[in-house]
Image: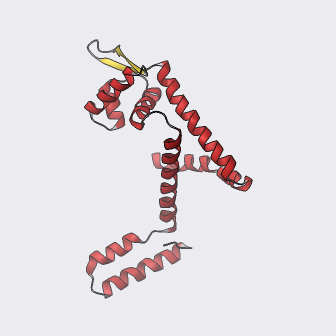
């Protein structure tokens, strides 16, 4: 349901909630009704969330050569530097055992290597190899090319101009969410 103004949204929610309570359906129905009505900003946020998610999924599906679990682990190592398996698992929000398996796969491919921890001689840290960094960059390059091709072939010059503002707007929204 789309609303042209905040006023229209408020009026619709009030009418919906009154109707639900008049029909004797109780508070649960009224609360459900109110929860289902989205403000214009909430509706835009939901449409944006869905579109960005679909765009990321389709771009990765058509361009990535690394499975997501591997590329995500490599990405963390690229940005964070050498980490223990426990630290890497915590960064990714997964179990140690799952990360240990992923690291083993990456190590077998030569994309990471284990080194003695400089701060604890008993521990090992996982480091990104040059081949690992190159694999990440190859996937990123492939994604950029897929996106650039879609932009060039699917969008008019006016649409490309509008799209040019999107990264800045998303950065501003991200900064606001981080505060």
Residue 83 location (% of width, % of height): 36, 24
Q: Relative to 164, say whether 138 is above or below.
A: above
Query: Camera-side residue: 82 or 142?
Result: 142
Q: 171 or 44: which is nearer to us?
A: 44
- Specify the color scheme: secondary structure
**Residue at the (27%, 86%) spot, across then down:** 24
Q: Position of residue 110 (x, y in %)?
A: 42, 19
Determine the residue positioned at 47% across, 76% down.
10
Is residue 179 visible in the rendered image? The answer is no
Q: Residue at x 36, y 34 (%)?
A: 91
109 left or right, relative to 89 = right
Q: Quadrant of residue 158?
A: bottom right
Question: x and y percent of residue 99 in the render?
Answer: 31, 30
Residue nearest the observer in this picture, 85 or 63: 63
The single residue placed furthest to the right in the displayed view is: 157
Residue 2 place in picture, x, y as percent: 52, 72
User: How many discs mark residues in the rendered view?
Assistant: 0
**Residue 110 appearing in the image:** yes
Q: In which quarter of the image is residue 144?
A: top right
Could you tell whether 75 is left or right of 150 in the image?
left
Query: Residue 93: which quarter of the image?
Result: top left
Give the side of residue 38 with respect to residue 114, left or right. right
Relative to 56, say whether 26 is above or below.
below
């Amino acid at each position: 349901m789309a609303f042209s103004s905040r006023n229209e949204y408020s009026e619709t929610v009030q009418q919906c909630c009154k109707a639900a309570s008049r029909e004797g359906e109780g508070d649960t129905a009224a609360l459900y009704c109110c929860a289902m009505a989205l403000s214009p900003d909430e509706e835009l946020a939901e449409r944006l969330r869905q579109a960005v998610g679909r765009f990321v999924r389709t771009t990765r599906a058509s361009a990535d050569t690394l499975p997501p679990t591997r590329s995500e682990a490599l990405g963390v190592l690229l940005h964070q530097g050498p980490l223990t398996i426990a630290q890497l698992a915590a960064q990714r929000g997964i179990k140690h055992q799952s990360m240990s398996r992923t690291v083993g796969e990456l190590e077998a491919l030569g994309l990471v290597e284990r080194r003695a921890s400089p701060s604890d001689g008993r521990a090992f840290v996982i480091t990104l190899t040059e081949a690992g960094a190159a694999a990440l960059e190859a996937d990123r390059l492939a994604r950029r090319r897929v996106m650039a091709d879609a932009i060039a072939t699917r969008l008019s010059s006016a649409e490309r101009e509008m799209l040019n503002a999107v990264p800045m707007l998303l950065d501003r929204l991200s900064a606001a969410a981080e505060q």
